[in-house]
Each structure stands twice: as C-alpha cells, then as structure tokens.
Amino acid sequence: MRVIAGKAKGRELKSLRGSSIRPTSDMVRGAIFSMLESVATDWSRVLDLYAGTGALGIEALSRGAEWVDFVEKNPRLCALIKENLERTGFAPQATVYCVSAAKALSILDAKYGILLMDPPYADSAITATAEKLASSRLVGKESTLVIEHSRRVPLEERYGHLHQVKNLHHGDSYVSVYQYTEGES
C-alpha cells in the first residue's frame, strides 16, 4: 500500500499482517480523492473516522489538507497510524485518537471540511453512526462526508443536512459522498 498522489506520492504505508482490516485499495482511494477534488471546498481540517492504517487521512494530507484527526479504537492500529505519519512526514499535522467512533463524536468539537468514514463492512451501526455524525457539531456548511461501505449496506439519500451528491462502486466497495445542504433535515 502506498500514497498515490501529492507531496508523499509513492511512499509506502505499513499495514498489519494477518489483520482483519480492509485497507481501501489504491484504485478506490484514487476515485475517492478524484471526487473530493471536484466537490470539496474546505481542505483545512479532515476527520478520518475508523482510520485503520490511516491511508485515507494520509492521502488527504499528501493532497493538501492542513490537518487530519484520525480515530481508531484498536491500539495496534493507532501505533501503526503514528508510524505511517512519521514515515510520510505528516506527524506534525495530525492527531491520533485511540477511541471508538461513538466516543470520538462525543469528544471532538471542531468543524471538519472533509469527513472520511470507512467502517468495517460487518459494522451494523454504519447508518446510526452516519446519522449521529450528520447531526453533530463536527459538520458545517462546507462539510463533505465520504462513506465507504459494502454494496450489501444501502445508505440513505440524506442524513440530517447532508445529502448524497455522488456515489461509485468497485466490486463490493461502494463510496457515497454527501454534502451539506440547507433546508429540512
């Protein structure tokens, strides 16, 4: 696995061998950031929820994000994210929170321009987490939410003020992109 574009292009990222995590493939990651470059307007602060190896957040930093908060509950993966941040030179532009997504939603208080959510495909709480995230203080008028999910997990067209604007699929990986819209939630 490697960073595919930007300042750290080509740098290798470590992953855990024998782990059950499913890092986003280079192809899907490239598609996600291609979509973000066409729709996201605020790259100042990014949230990488269910960060795993940190590949999505590190890709955002490589492509110009100013700051990324990584949220991952597995302590071994938290250490790996920190190592990957050191390897790519982005450690000064990030914080790693070794807590659950639910806990992170209760302790974080910044508004994010980009929110990346890549939960385990078997996570049955994906819709509930998306609803909580959409109604949280973390989402503002410039926010773009990206959710990577299994094709077997259909998502809503709208979560709060976040409305689905794009989606793509590759194999079992689906990516749904939401943006803030005024009006009824």
Image (cartoon, rainbow, N blue to C red):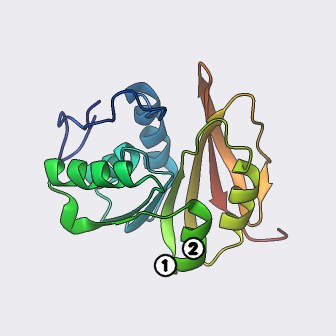
Q: Residue at x 59, y 40 (%)?
A: 120
Using the rendered image of the protein, determine whether residue 63 is visible from the camera's viewpoint.
no
Quadrant of the rendering where the C terminus is positioned: bottom right
Q: Position of residue 62 (x, y in %)?
A: 25, 50
What amino acid is at disc 2? Leu
Amino acid type shown at disc 1: Ala
Residue 69 place in picture, x, y as percent: 39, 65
**Residue 94 x/y as whole percent:** 29, 65
| 176 left or right, relative to 110 | right
The residue shown at (73%, 50%) is 125
Mark 2 vs 1: CB contact within 8 A: yes
Is 33 situated left or right of 139 in this image? left
- Classed neighbour count for the residue bearing mark 1: other residues with Cα under 10 Å, few (<14), some (14–19), many (≥20): some
Mark 2 or mark 1, which has the lower sequence index? 1
Q: Where does label 2 land, which residue?
A: 138
Q: Is residue 105 left or right of residue 3?
A: right
What residue sits 81% from the left and 71% below the top?
Answer: 183
The residue sitting at the right extreme is 184
Crowding around mark 2 (Cα neighbors within 10 Å: few <14, some 14 to 19, many 20+) is some
Any part of residue 164 in sight: yes
- Residue 131 sits in which quadrant? bottom right
- Please name the residue that numbered disc 1 is placed on: 110
